[in-house]
Image (tube, rainbow, N blue to C red):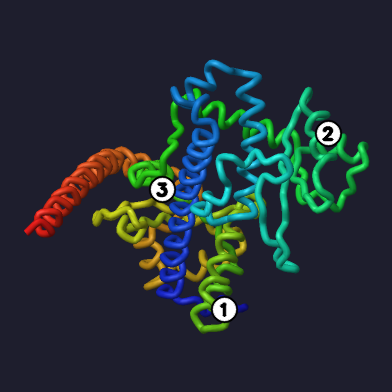
Amino acid sequence: MNLNDLKPGEFKDFVEDSATLATGAKIYSDGIQYVDSSSFWGWIKSSYPKAMANGIGSWVNDHYPDQAFRLLQSKGLEWDAFRDFHPQLFDINKLSPSSNTKFVDFTSINPFDGNTLNIQVKASLKGGIYNSVKEMLSCPIDTKFIVNQSVYDQAVKQGIPNDRFLKVVPDNQVTQITDKRLQDVSSGSIDVDISTGGVLNEVGKGALIGAVLYVGVSAISNYRKYKSGQMSYNDFANRLLKDGTKGGIMGGTMASVNVGVQWSLVKLGLGAGNPIAIPVLIVISYGLKKIIDPMFKDGSYAETLQTMQYYEDFGKGWLNFGKMSEELYKNQKVFLSTLNQSKKKSEILNTISSKVDDNLNNLIEEI
């Protein structure tokens, strides 16, 4: 698509819409990571209520490293597998604390034929591999497996056919994820209950650091298709965010645009009216830079770039983005903390109000 007729206003709209998409994706990602982590630890605690009576951290410290690693290794893969097959995290009640059924950890619906899949998850490294395979051999023939590589290798040797494996996870991936979860416990950064304050804090930490998006010629071409009705908003957004992760392989001299996007916490479902300002660095690919630079040198074109904080020197743009992120984080982390406290007070007031209402209802019934 020919971009020689690119207008200042069109480019400005493209940058602003792209920046909003980038921050929205980042906020969503940060929030989902928090919900996923909190849900996992809540599930672990409810699965072993007696063992975890004094807290997960206490149990891990008492059983570190071997037993703690083995538990989080096996339960961690089971959780991750369930999440893959049930992407709605709030459906986690479908994975019961007593999921240690002999033959089935959880079920899922096969999208191709609508039949129920009975799924067993096994994660073992070193000494537990043979016991895992022994249990798999006793499973009904319709049971499907999700396992790590070492378990898979031994299971195949024992005659379990390939078509019974839904997924095989590399051993090093299991180890890395388990180590990360152990580190989170040790640092005291886990939360076993999903709370609005927790979501707010996690979103704030990530979002205030800022979002980075890489855009090229195809991004503006797709934007034009979206604006003209040739492409849906979802298709444009998906392509932009997917292509935006490829910035590292673009190469060449790049330019950048610094943008500030404000997100209302009400829109995020966090119940507060004040917006969070999030800096965004739009990294311009070499190909797009060659189109923009000569076109935007004079008149209204040049004025548009100046108001948008466009930097022909990518290094200067990156430096400015860093300063924006740092200053916003310093200023608004206090606001986030205050907001979190206000949220707690609000919850207490709601509880008191609810009790007062109950008392009034009781009195009315007595009259």
Say which residue label 2 marks.
Answer: 134
C-alpha distance separating marks 1 and 2: 53 Å
Residue 346 location (% of width, % of height): 21, 47
Q: Compared to 221, does 331 lie above or below?
A: above
Q: Which amino acid does label 3 sit on?
A: Ala
At a point 65% along the width and 19% down the height, the residue shown is 66
> Where is residue 166 shown, x and y percent of the image?
77, 51
Front-lying residue, 212 or 367: 367
Find the residue positioned furthest to the left: 367
- Inspect the image, locate mark 2, and give the three-letter code of the amino acid beneath it: Lys
Viewer-nearest of discs 1 and 2? 2
Amino acid at the residue labelled 1: Met
Q: Which element is circle 3 on? A: helix
Which residue bears the numbered disc 3? Answer: 207
At x 57%, y 71%, the residue is 235
Relative depth, front residue between 12 and 337: 337
Dot 2: element: helix
Asked whether disc 2 touches disc 3, contact meaning CB atoms under 8 Å apart, the reply is no
Asked if residue 322 can be seen in this view, the reply is: no
Residue 76 relative to residue 196: left or right: right
User: In the displayed structure, would residue 251 be above or below residue 172?
Assistant: below
Name of the residue lying farthest toward the top:
62
Asked whether, in this view, residue 301 is left or right of residue 40, the answer is left
Tell me if 314 is positioned left or right of 154 in this view. left
Visible in this render: residue 52? yes
**Is the residue under label 3 in contact with that under label 1 (CB below 8 Å)?**
no
Residue under circle 1? Answer: 231
- The mark nearer the N terminus, 1 or 3, is 3
Q: Which of pointers 2 and 3 lies earlier in the amino acid sequence?
A: 2
